[in-house]
């Protein structure tokens, strides 16, 4: 059974940084895409970034490009989201997710971690 457990959220001032972690377990993730989504109050969940577990290819939403960096540690089975130059509009619950790279459906989700950026 796949489990994704996020950590690292919190309260930070605008311009600050946070690093989110997602500890993955329950299977090997070769051939998987791992990603981060976020959901702000009253808004739909939106894509933030993804990484190919095997080859490390990354993709980012335009809103975070140049500020956020997704990475993974294969040995620790952990995915990270380094968030720099945070803005109040980055405030949201951040979710870790994963899917086979051949699938269009994000199959596994973590419970989410709150990120609040104060102005």
Image: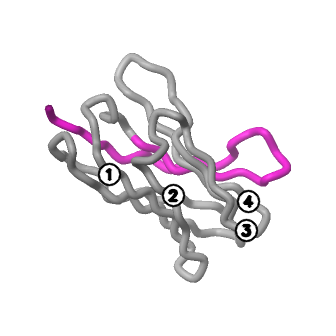
Quadrant of the drawing holding the N terminus: bottom right
Tag nearer the camera, 2 or 1: 1
Of tags 2 and 4, the one toward the viewer is: 2
- Element assignment for label 3: loop
Q: Nearer the viewer, mark 4 or mark 3?
A: 3
The part of the image, by quadrant, that contains residue 7 is: bottom left
Q: Are marks 4 and 3 in contact (CB under 8 Å)?
A: no
Secondary structure of the residue carrying tag 2 is strand
In 3D space, how far apart are the residues under numbered discs 4 and 1 (Cα atoms)? 26 Å
Q: Residue furthest right?
A: 102
Alpha carbon distance from label 2 to label 1:
12 Å
The CA distance from mark 4 to mark 3 is: 10 Å
Q: Position of residue 19 (x, y in %)?
A: 34, 59
Dot 3: few (<14), some (14–19), or many (≥20) neighbours within 10 Å? few
Q: Mark 1 — residue?
A: 84
Q: Which residue is mark 2?
A: 70
Residue at 59%, 69% (x, y): give it: 25
Which residue is more in the foreground, 25 or 104?
A: 104
Q: Residue at x 73, y 69 (%)?
A: 54
For disc 1, the neighbor class at 10 Å (few under 14, some 14 to 19, many from 20) is some
Residue 70: x percent and y percent?
A: 51, 57
Mark 1 and mark 3: Cα distance apart in space: 24 Å
Q: Quadrant of the C terminus?
A: top left
Q: Residue at position x 78%, y 54% from top? A: 100
Please tell me in which quadrant of the rendered image residue 57 appears: bottom right
Asked if residue 99 lies in the magenta stretch, the reply is: yes
Q: Using the image, tell me which numbered label, if any, was put on residue 55.
A: 3
Residue highlighted by disc 4: 32
- Disc 2 vs disc 4: Cβ atoms closer than 8 Å? no
**Magenta extent:** 94-119
């Amino acid at each position: 059974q796949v489990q994704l457990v996020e950590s690292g959220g919190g309260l930070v001032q605008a311009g600050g940084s946070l690093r989110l972690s997602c500890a993955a377990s329950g299977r090997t993730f070769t051939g998987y895409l791992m990603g981060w989504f976020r959901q702000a109050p009253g808004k739909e969940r939106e894509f933030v970034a993804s990484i190919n577990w095997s080859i490390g290819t990354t993709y980012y939403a335009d809103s975070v490009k140049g500020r956020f960096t997704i990475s993974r540690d294969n040995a620790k089975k952990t995915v990270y989201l380094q968030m720099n130059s945070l803005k109040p509009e980055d405030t949201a619950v951040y979710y870790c997710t994963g899917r086979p790279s051949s699938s269009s459906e994000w199959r596994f989700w973590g419970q989410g971690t709150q990120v609040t950026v104060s102005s």
